[in-house]
Amino acid sequence: MQRLILLMLTHLLAQGNPADDEEAIRNLIIRSNDKIEQVQAKQLCRFKSSSENITNVCFKKRTSTLESKSFINSYQHTIAVSVLSPDEAQQLFDHLSGQKHRFGLGNELVELRTCAARAQLIAHALQEDCRVNSVKVFALPSSSYFSDGLNVESHQKKYHWDSFHIANAVMVSDKGVSKWYVIDPLLFDHAVPKEDWENLFKTKDKSVIIEIASPSRYAPMSSFKDDPNQPIATQKAEDDLRRARRDARILNGP
């Protein structure tokens, strides 16, 4: 593939017009990116069609159905969520964070701008791969005129979002006490209590707003309704992730 791209670039550059060359190179990178995406999608389909017990892909020991608990989210909707142990929450995190390409991780040009897509795909994977009903957590900057968006420092790296950041959360029961644990492989290397995730944002701005949403809600904008009965659709997430990867390849060059 790389040799073919180089040969085609050499041919294009020999034609002469710089403006035409730039457009042709861009189109070539886009076509190459689409071809790569098709190959990787086929590999993912092969992984998901394995005959292995699907629950065992996510959990090491569990053989029974997960307990479920109902709660009212930030939008006054009742949602049924699965209840896990702390060890199971970490097993979920390990299962998901290890699939970097699937969830847009490992490339700074991609991972920072695809939190909505990643959270949607993870919510779907939790439901389909692991039979776990989850929620989403939204971090929103203060509506104050002086707000500078969301600013976070984690793993000696600084992150900034103008409008929002999104992650996934599961309910964990430990010694009879239930609490939310957030799965955010961009900012953490393990599942963390919601308070720890929230404090990471509020270190810079205590007025940051944290909301709990239905797993199907793509983003906090009003155009995306919060509906617990809505299926977790993945087409927009896959399209957004594909577009981000394409743009990253164009920026990095062939």
Image: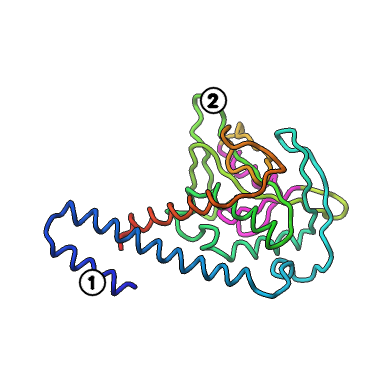
**Lateral position of residue 95 relative to residue 102, left or right:** right
Give x and y (percent) for residue 173: 82, 53
Q: Amino acid at mark 2?
A: Ser
What residue is drawn where x is 13% and y is 62%?
15
Which of the labelled discs sits on residue 7, or is there none?
A: 1
What residue is drawn where x is 61% and y is 31%?
207
Q: CA distance from mark 1 to mark 2?
A: 54 Å
Q: Nearer the viewer, residue 131 or 160?
A: 131
Q: Identify the secondary structure beneath mark 1.
A: helix
The image quarter in which residue 98 lies: bottom right
Part of the protein shown in magenta: 180-204
Q: Is residue 200 magenta?
A: yes
Give x and y (percent) for residue 33: 38, 62
**Lateral position of residue 64 relative to residue 37, left or right:** right
| Residue found at the far top of this picture | 145
Task: From this view, report whether residue 118 is shown above or below residue 2.
Answer: above
Residue under label 2, please give it. Answer: 144
Binning the other alpha carbons within 10 Å of mark 1 as few (below 14), some (14 to 19) or many (20 upward) gives few
Q: Nearer the viewer, residue 170 or 21?
A: 21
Task: From this view, report whether residue 171 is shown above or below residue 16.
Answer: above
Q: Nearer the viewer, residue 130 or 20?
A: 20
Q: Amino acid at mark 1?
A: Leu
Q: Image quadrant for the N terminus?
A: bottom left
Binning the other alpha carbons within 10 Å of mark 2 as few (below 14), some (14 to 19) or many (20 upward) gives few
Q: Identify the secondary structure beneath mark 2.
A: loop
